[in-house]
Image (tube, helix red, strand yellow):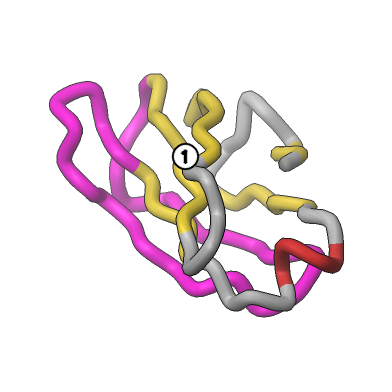
Amino acid sequence: MQVYPNPATGRFAVKLPAALAAGRPTLTLRNSLGQVVLAQAVTGPRTELDAQGPGTGMYALRLTGPGLAAVTTRVVLQ
């Protein structure tokens, strides 16, 4: 899973291998308390997220879906 740009200023993209994107996984953005501040279904190998609402800071972006082991990466919002 590639996230760019990172750090981001609100909008960022997530790039996945086509095989992962085909299963229609979900991306969730969580704050430092573990609260979900954004959840979005993956729409293809490249999905854009609009994270202008949560505010600045470090977040955990988690990819989950049927038959997938969860993948988590950090995203910094400025």
On the image, the x and y values in percent for residue 57 come to: 37, 21
Toward which corner of the image does residue 1 lie, by quadrant?
top right
The residue nearer to you, when weighing 78 against 35, is: 35
Is residue 21 left or right of 31 when viewed as pictured? right
Q: Total of numbered circles in the picture?
A: 1
* Furthest residue in direction right, as rendered: 18
The question of residue 48 being in magenta is answered with yes
Element on which disc 1 rests: strand
Who's the residue at 48% across and 43% down the image?
70
Can you give x and y, in whole percent of width and height, for residue 67 in the image? 53, 62
Is 19 situated left or right of 24 in this image? right
Determine whether 27 is above or below 61 in the image.
below
Q: Nearer the viewer, residue 60 or 8?
A: 60
Residue 16 lies, with reference to residue 54, above or below; the image says: below
Residue positioned 63% across, 25% down in the render: 7
* Relative vertical location of residue 11 with respect to residue 7 in this rendering, above or below: below
| Of residues 37 and 45, the one drawn nearer to the viewer in this rendering | 45
- Kind of residue sitting beneath label 1: Leu
Residue sitting farthest toward the front:
67
Mark 1, other Cα within 10 Å: few <14 / some 14–19 / many ≥20: many
Where 74 sits versus 71, above or below? above
Residue 47 painted magenta: yes
Q: Position of residue 20 (x, y in %)?
A: 72, 62
Residue that appears at 81% across and 66% down:
19
Q: Which residues are magenta?
A: 30-57
Where is residue 55 drawn, in percent x and y? Answer: 31, 36
Residues 49 and 1: in front is 1
Report which residue position mark 1 lands on. Answer: 61
Query: Is residue 66 found left or right of 32 in the rendered image?
Result: right
Q: Residue at x 16, y 41 (%)?
A: 35
